[in-house]
Image (cartoon, rainbow, N blue to C red):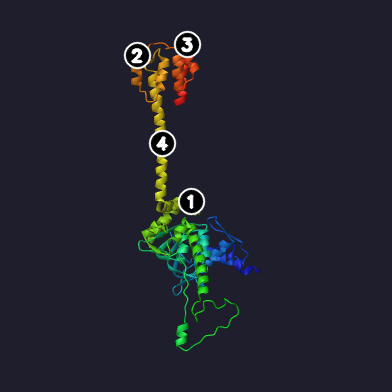
Amino acid sequence: MKSYPHIAARALNRPLLLEPGYARFFFAALSPRLNISELVLPSGESLEGQAIAGVLNAYDPSRGYRAYDVQGGVAVIPVDGTLVHKNAALDPVSGLQGYDGIEAKLAGALADPEVRGIMLDINSPGGEVSGVKDLATKIADSSKPVWAHANELAASAAYWLASAADRLIVTQTAEVGSVGVLVAHADYSKQLEDDGVKVTLIHSGANKVDGNPYEPLPDGVRDRWQGELDQLRMLFASSVADGRKMDVQSVLSTEARLYRGGAAVDAGLADAVMPFSDAINEFSTTLSRLGGTSKGSVLMSTQGARADAQGQDVMLAAEALRLAEESRAEGFKAGADAERARISAILQHAEAADRGESAVTLALTPGMTPETAGALLATFPKAATGARTVAELADAAGVKADLASNMGDKKNAFAEQSAMLWKRFG
């Protein structure tokens, strides 16, 4: 590869008066001629390979070194008009915009160190199938956060691109959706017949002239085309479902309908309703608050917003369940605390003195209040009522009978039985 030493001598190791953004493009353009494999920017960021190519792809002489506007650190990439596979231009021409031009701007914005996020400014009815899936994948896999704004239309292929963004915002009057596919077959056979023109198609291969405009569409061809359209629609819906965090059936159930403004949010096809200027400001503020160009951190923020829009009912249900569990746990604890307090009040009642066995039995009686227990204890004789009777009462209460039958030391027996009560209800 030629090294162009005369260019290197004038471009390298010499003071230059270049605007920093253009300087980045200038050296990116020289990189293949001067064997430059890496560009280190004043910020310390390093550009290599595809990043350098991205700087070149996004260069537009008519606009300066950038092919997109930057507002508050957000690169604004228009998606306008009918979308086609290749248009060999960065901007729309005669109402057509190529996926290749959008991709070039995307690559440039991803390589631009002054760009922290990318906003797709969409006003398009859709367009060709060819190329849209690949571009949507690049949008979804971009290293920087990408938002989309329907301003005022993001239908069909344009919505495919919009759904790949991390967040989709619409205006109040914008329409989004139309997740479907169509083929228009033109049949000129009657017109040609009336004009006295007969077209003879000579072909090799049974399916070579399927769907030609010079004869009615055969049923077999129509059925095959229908099957292909259904497969494309499923691919479209699956991509939308992935991007919008929806299930495929919910996307298919829209039946290619367009949704306007808030209805799009309710259907899960968009995240918020606001004018374009507000969307830019919110995006820029989010990027500033989270810092850097980390897609992961911005995704957490935008997915939280999406969850607010799409999953409010689910979140409320989860919150209600959590509160119910907390209430149940609190109720169980309160009940246990109350039971301990009841037992303690009976065991420590003034009338329980020298009536420990009877006090234990009454304490283990469900629903026995300290007041009622005290009144009953007052009628019992002090001291044991007989080992057998106490053992039977203790056994009925779930207390070991041998503790009650060994009454040589009433205070010890009372203490042991009390300990068992605390173990049981503590």
Q: Position of residue 299 (x, y in %)?
A: 47, 53
Q: Which label was assigned to residue 297?
A: 1
Count residues near mark 2 (Cα–Cα under 10 Å), then give few for <14, some for 14-19, many for 20+.
few
Disc nearer the start of the sequence (3/4)? 4
| Residue closest to the eye, 161 or 299 | 161
Q: Which residue is mark 4?
A: 328
Q: Which residue is mark 3?
A: 409
Q: Is residue 209 visible?
A: yes
Q: Position of residue 256 (x, y in %)?
A: 43, 65
Count residues near mark 3 (Cα–Cα under 10 Å), then give few for <14, some for 14-19, many for 20+.
few
Q: Dot 3 lies on which element?
A: loop
Q: Nearer the viewer, mark 3 or mark 1?
A: 3
Q: Dot 2 lies on which element?
A: loop
Q: Are marks 2 and 1 in contact (CB under 8 Å)?
A: no
Q: Which residue is mark 2?
A: 379
Disc nearer the start of the sequence (4/1)? 1
Q: Nearer the viewer, mark 4 or mark 1?
A: 4
